[in-house]
Image (spheres, rainbow, N blue to C red):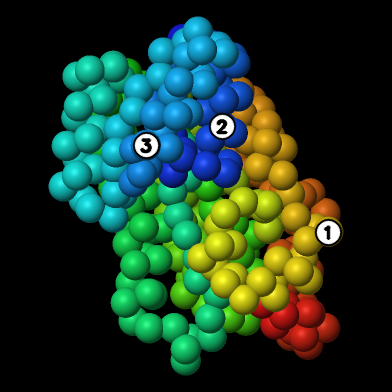
Amino acid sequence: MKLSGKVIVITGASSGIGAQLALQAAALGAVLVIMARTKSKLEELKEKIEAQYRTPCHVYALDVSDERMVEETFARVEKEVGSVDVLVNNAGFGIFKTFQDASMAEVKEMFHVNVFGLVACTKAVLPSMLRRNSGHIVNIASLAGKIATPKSSAYAATKHAVLGFTNSLRMELGNTNIGVTAVNPGPIETNFFNIADQSGTYVKSMQRYMLKADYVAKKTIKAIETGKRELNLPRWMGIGPVIFSLFPGLFERAAGKSLNKK
C-alpha cells in the first residue's frame, strides 16, 4: 500500500511514536486524522503538518477508553473525512509497579486504554474496510507482550492481550485484502516513561538501549507499505522471545535480576 491520498487514523498522536507517524505519513502525501485526549497538542501538530507538507490534517479529541465516544468519533470521521484506509492503534500507557503495589484502578485503566480502546477503534473501522475489501490495521503492542517482566504484570498482560487479538484478527481476515500488523518495540525514548517509570530507575538502566520514536515510526510506515505481519524492534531484542519460548525457566533465572531493575 502506498500512503499517498490514503486516509490514515492515528490514535495517541499528540507525541512520541504517534506524532512521528503523523509527520512521516504526511511527508508521503497521506490524509491525516490524528486523535488524542489533549486537543491543543494535536492542533500544534496539525499546523506543522499542513504548513510543512501541504496535506490535509484533521483533529479529533478522543479518549479511547470511552466506547461511546469512540463510536461517535469514528462515525464523524467517516462522514467528514471519508473511509479509513489505515488505522494505527497507538494510544496506550503503562505503570511499572509490582502487582502487590498496583491498585485495581490502575490495572483496570491500563486494560481500558491498551486493550478495550484498541478493540473499540478496530471495531469502528472494520465494517467499512470489509465492504471495500481494503485497508490496514496496525496495533502498537510491545515486546512486553512476548516476554513478561517483573513490575509490569498488568502492562505485560495488556500487551499479551493485544498480540492475541491481533494474531486472531489477522487469521480471520486471511481471505480479504485487509492487512493486520503488530509492532512490538522495546523501550522508546518518549514521555511514556513519565508515567511508567516515575522513579527514573528503569530509564537510567536502559538508556543506551532506547529506541528513537522517529526510527520506530519509519519502520512502522515501511511495514504498512509492505504488508508485514509483525515487526520487532530492535531486531536483536526479538531473539529474547525465541529463547524464552524454548527455555523459559533458564531465561527467567538468567534475566530475572536485570529485568527487575524497573
Pointer 1 or 2: first along the chain? 2
Does dot 1 land on a helix, a strand or a loop?
Answer: helix
Residue closer to the observer: 104 or 6: 104
Which amino acid type is marked by label 2? Leu
Residue 250 seen anywhere in this rendered image of the structure: no
The residue to which callout 3 is attached is: 40
Q: Residue at x 76, y 69 (%)?
A: 204
Residue drawn where x is 51% and y is 12% of the image: 51
Q: In this view, does 45 lie to the left or right of 126?
A: right
Residue for badge 2: 21
Taking 80 as reference, is 227 above or below it? Answer: below
Q: What residue type is labelled 1?
A: Arg
Which mark is first along the chain, 3 or 2?
Answer: 2
Which quadrant of the structure image shows residue 246? Answer: bottom right
Nearer-N-terminus badge (3/1): 3
Q: What residue type is labelled 3?
A: Ser
At a point 39% along the width and 29% down the height, the residue shown is 43
What percent of the width, then of the height, locates residue 255?
Answer: 79, 80
User: Badge 2: few (under 14), some or many (20 or more) residues near its Cα, within 10 Å?
Assistant: many
Task: Give the distance between the C-alpha atoms of the residues marked 3 and 1, in whole angstroms.
Answer: 32 Å
In which quadrant is the C terminus drawn? Answer: bottom right
For this rendering, which residue is in front, 184 or 66?
Answer: 66
Q: Is residue 225 left or right of residue 205?
A: left
- What is the secondary structure assignment of the residue under circle 3? helix
- What kind of element bears circle 2? helix
For the residues marked 2 and 3, what is the alpha-carbon distance in whole angstroms?
Answer: 18 Å
Look at mark 1 in the image and give the residue it sits on: 208
